[in-house]
Image (cartoon, coloured by chain):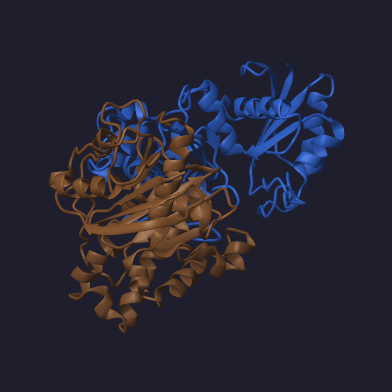
Chain colours: A blue, B brown
Amino acid sequence: MILGAVEAGGTKFVCALGDEQGNIRERAVFPTTTPDETMGRVIDFFRPHNVEAIGIGSFGPVDLRPDSPTYGHITSTPKQAWANFDVVGTLKQAFPVPIGFDTDVNAAALGEQRWGAAQGLDSCLYMTVGTGIGVGAVVEGRLLHGLLHPEMGHMFVRRHPDDAFAGICPYHGDCLEGMASGPAIERRWGKKGAELADRKEVWELEAFYLAQAIANYVLILSPKKVIVGGGVMKQLSILPLVRQRVQELLNGYVQHEAVLENIGEYIVSPGLGDNAGVAGALALAAEQAMRGGRRP
Amino acid sequence: MILGAVEAGGTKFVCALGDEQGNIRERAVFPTTTPDETMGRVIDFFRPHNVEAIGIGSFGPVDLRPDSPTYGHITSTPKQAWANFDVVGTLKQAFPVPIGFDTDVNAAALGEQRWGAAQGLDSCLYMTVGTGIGVGAVVEGRLLHGLLHPEMGHMFVRRHPDDAFAGICPYHGDCLEGMASGPAIERRWGKKGAELADRKEVWELEAFYLAQAIANYVLILSPKKVIVGGGVMKQLSILPLVRQRVQELLNGYVQHEAVLENIGEYIVSPGLGDNAGVAGALALAAEQAMRGGRRP
């Protein structure tokens, strides 16, 4: 089966051709500009190929409610040009094949569960810490949705007692994303994370917030694997700090060897590296092909 | 079908006879004492009847892992006599029928989803605020489990700036349960909640913590209905305060009419009142009967 995959991010789009085993044959990356131009490039990428289904993992918020008139749209994003844009409809017009659609982070969680760090498990959490903080989850074998899709990056967190930074979330100020995303790091310290690699206090504070979020996710969702990726996590010193602080916070309460003894194998980097999202989009395409195009 | 239901709580046990439609025919309540005495009373209650399956919603932590040698046990509870007690095995010896087993709060969430406030929805959250704070959830149509079962009551919350109370959780001090459970209210104010009904500041502070927890659950799980019960919620003034503060915290970010406009129908009291748990245990029994006794 030839499947198409789109990881539609706020800064870049990744398109791929692949199959239902997660093999990626061809891959292209281009910047997110206007919807017309960007979707034009997506369509040009797939045009020469006979894709049988397409999967999309998209930045959001997106409308995933099967019975909604705006199903398949990006909804209230601050990226004005993309607000209320019909991603699924636009692709469907060009390619009348089954199209799977979910959030970028749910796609990445699915990719990691099928072929990455959470292979063989029926639950996992995928967190990306970059321009924003997004989290997707597989729970009881299924991608997690509900009233809408989760927005775990906006969780309310305790402020570090020595941290006077106001936070940059336009909705919540000092929620997790407002305190610990890449742009929050840059605003707080006056430099990008990559330029702060040797500043220990930067990564200790970052770990304080990320660990608190992960501890709460563990208490609330009890995932079997926690996968953390995104630009900020390229700082190699941070993951061990996060693990240590999660253990300290939970303080022996979650009595499972994964947390108590093997936390190095419990909170991990993506097994698929930067391909988690696009591999997950292949999985969404394959699922949708099997469903014959019916919405979930 | 004659089904047995047990709501095994830390302070009291509720036993019931009923059917797969959630009808309760007979009901008995007795205090939780020693395992021998308490389970003896459970067995005496069911003995005269030909129950075809039994469902148990139990206080915990409990072992729900189907492949675990201690499946069906209460595990590390501070109630010494019950630690490592084999609830399912004890009942199975007396009644060799299919036995369903889950946490008390997961059972209540299931009861409310089948026959209560979340009827017809494929997701809901059930929160009880009493001696402890426990939360169960139905997600994508299934009860939520993972590495273990969720322990959402121990979520880390922001402290109110005027609140100097240390918190009473033996593991985490000032986690949600440590700050906002019934015993926390009593310790902080020197009186039981029922005696503090007219103290506005008590319920405003309580709502500060509960709303924060619920806002985070909404961001993380996106439930289609949030049901809040338990002894503390018998203070009628508190639910409207909680709703208002959840809206303030989310600040328009979760763009769904349930949160923006109809929050009075989104965050609600249990539709089954005090029978949510025992009705859910009936549902667990019915499910287990259909599975022929195989573990999930």
Tally of numbered tags: 0
Residue B202, position as x, y percentages in the image = 30, 76
Q: Nearer the viewer, residue A117 or B100?
A: B100
The residue positioned farthest toward the bottom in the image shown:
B198
Residue B208, position as x, y percentages in the image = 38, 68
Look at the picture and state if A274 lies above or below B72.
Answer: above
Which residue shows up at 82% across the image and 27% down it? A44
Which residue shows up at 43% across the image and 43% down it? B284
Residue A250 visible (yes or no): yes
On the rendered structure, is B186 left or right of A14? left
Q: Nearer the viewer, residue B118 or B241?
A: B118
Write down the quadrant of residue B233 in the picture: bottom left
Write down the quadrant of residue B229 in the picture: bottom left
Residue A141, position as x, y percentages in the image = 51, 32
Look at the picture and state if B197 lies above or below B144.
Answer: below
Look at the picture and state if A153 lies above or below B127.
Answer: above
On the rendered structure, is A88 left or right of B148? right
Which residue shows up at 17% across the image and 48% down it? B78
On the rendered structure, is B191 left or right of A165? left
Residue A153 visible (yes or no): no
Residue B56, position as x, y percentages in the image = 34, 45
On the rendered structure, is A222 left or right of A230? left
Looking at the rendered image, the quarter that the C terminus of chain B falls into is: top left
The residue positioned farthest toward the front in the image shown:
B48
Which residue shows up at 62% across the image and 59% down it? B255
